[in-house]
Amino acid sequence: QVQLVESGGGLVQAGGSLRLSCTASGSIFSINIMGWYRQAPGKQRELVADCTSDGNTVYADSVKGRFTISRDNAKNTVYLQMNSLKPEDTAVYYCNLGMIRRPTRYDYWGQGTQVTVSS
């Protein structure tokens, strides 16, 4: 059984910073992708950023230059450093672990952490 535990959300003023953390436990494949998605009220869940186990990263255009994803493979932990936060970044942020055993990807999700950015 795979579990993801997130921390680090909260309330911050526009221009401020937050750091999210997510640690995975259980049977984890060595080839995997860890990342963050977010879902704002009335909107679909969207990718914020992800990072493969060999360090390749992808960012949503809306967060490029402001957010940085990193991971510690030894700890099965992924971080999201969010700087210059904007009110439109307000959402529930979900940690995702995608484990790949070709041709299948197995996805696991954290419980979500609220990020609220006030103007």
Image (tube, rainbow, N blue to C red):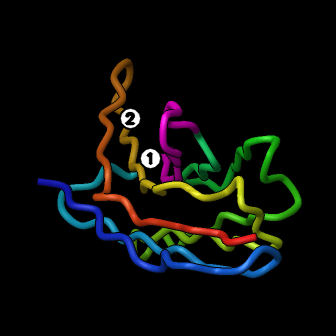
Name the residue rendered at 52%, 52% in the picture.
35
Residue drawn at 30 percent across, 34 percent down: 106
Q: Position of residue 58 (x, y in %)?
A: 71, 44
**Count of all numbered marks drawn on residues in the image:** 2
Quarter location, residue 27 = bottom left
With 118 as the anchor, is 42 left or right in this view?
left
* Residue that lies at the very extreme toward the front in this rendered image: 119
Is residue 43 part of the magenta span, yes or no?
Answer: yes
* Figure quadrant of residue 17: bottom right
Look at the numbered disc 2 and give the secondary structure of its residue: strand
For disc 1, the neighbor class at 10 Å (few under 14, some 14 to 19, many from 20) is some
- Residue type at tag 1: Asn
* Callout 2 crowding tier (Cα within 10 Å): few <14, some 14–19, many ≥20: some
Q: Residue 83 location in percent, x, y?
A: 78, 74
Which residues are the magenta region? 32-46
Q: Give the quarter of the figure containing the C terminus.
A: bottom right
The relative height of residue 7 versus residue 111 in the rendered view (above or below) is below
Is there CB contact under 8 Å for labels 2 and 1?
yes
Residue shown at 60% from the left, 52% from the top:
51
Where does the image place residue 76, in percent across and percent down from the top left? 39, 69
Disc 2 marks which residue?
100
Q: 26 or 20: which is nearer to us?
A: 20
Magenta stretch encompasses residue 8: no
Residue type beneath disc 2? Ile
Say the numbered circle drawn on residue 32. Answer: 1
Label 1: which secondary element: strand
> Is 110 situated left or right of 50 in this image?
left
What type of secondary structure mainly makes up the magenta span?
Answer: strand
Q: CA distance from mark 2 to mark 1?
A: 6 Å
